[in-house]
Amino acid sequence: MAQLLSKPVKHIASAPAIHADGVSLRYEDIYVLRVISLALPAVEHFAGVGPISAGKSTLFKILAGL
């Protein structure tokens, strides 16, 4: 089962629309994402681009709280 290693942070109006600092995800002993940090301002569109199996969908699921 996946274990979320970072804790949610209360939103502040002047903060970026999406902010993640040091997010990691592992399944048992295997890290699928390790120490991801990002801050995105409020924008109309955003694209996550990268190779297959890079963790894009997994990162978006974590940010959505799934």
Image: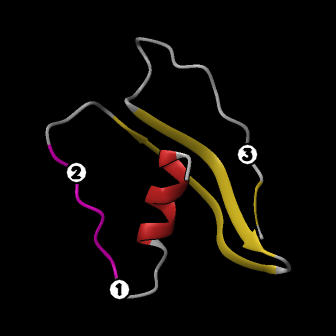
Was residue 48 drawn as part of the magenta stretch in this picture? yes
* Horizontal arrangement in the rendering, residue 34 relative to residue 52 (left or right): right
Residue that mark 3 sits on:
6
Q: Quadrant of the N terminus?
A: bottom right
Q: Main secondary structure of the magenta part?
A: loop
Kindly give the residue lying farthest to the top in the view shown.
13
Residue at the image point whose x is 42% and y is 69% from the top: 56
Q: Residue at x 28, y 71 (%)?
A: 49
Q: Amino acid at mark 2?
A: Phe
Q: Which residue is mark 1?
A: 51
Name which quarter of the figure residue 60 lies in.
Answer: bottom left
Query: Residue 13, relative to residue 24: is it above or below?
Result: above
Q: Where residue 48 sits in the image (x, y, percent)?
A: 30, 64
Identify whether 20 is placed above or below 26.
above
Q: Are marks 1 and 2 in contact (CB under 8 Å)?
A: no
Q: Which residue is mark 2?
A: 46
Which x, y percent locates residue 30?
77, 82
Q: How many numbered discs?
A: 3
User: Which region is colored magenta?
Assistant: 45-50
Kindly indicate the quadrant of the structure image that contains residue 42: top left
- For badge 1, the amino acid type reads Pro
Q: Is residue 13 above or below residue 32?
A: above
Measured in 3D between alpha carbons, the distance from the residue under mark 2 to the one under mark 3, in whole angstroms, is: 23 Å
From the viewer's perspective, tell me whether residue 51 is left or right of residue 62: left
Query: Residue drawn at (19%, 35%), measured in percent from left and top?
Result: 43
Q: Earlier in the sequence, mark 2 or mark 3?
A: 3
- Position of residue 65 relative to residue 32, above or below, is above
Question: Could you tell me which secondary element the residue under label 1 belongs to?
Answer: loop
- Sequence-first disc among 1 and 2: 2
- What's the CA distance linking mark 1 and mark 2? 17 Å
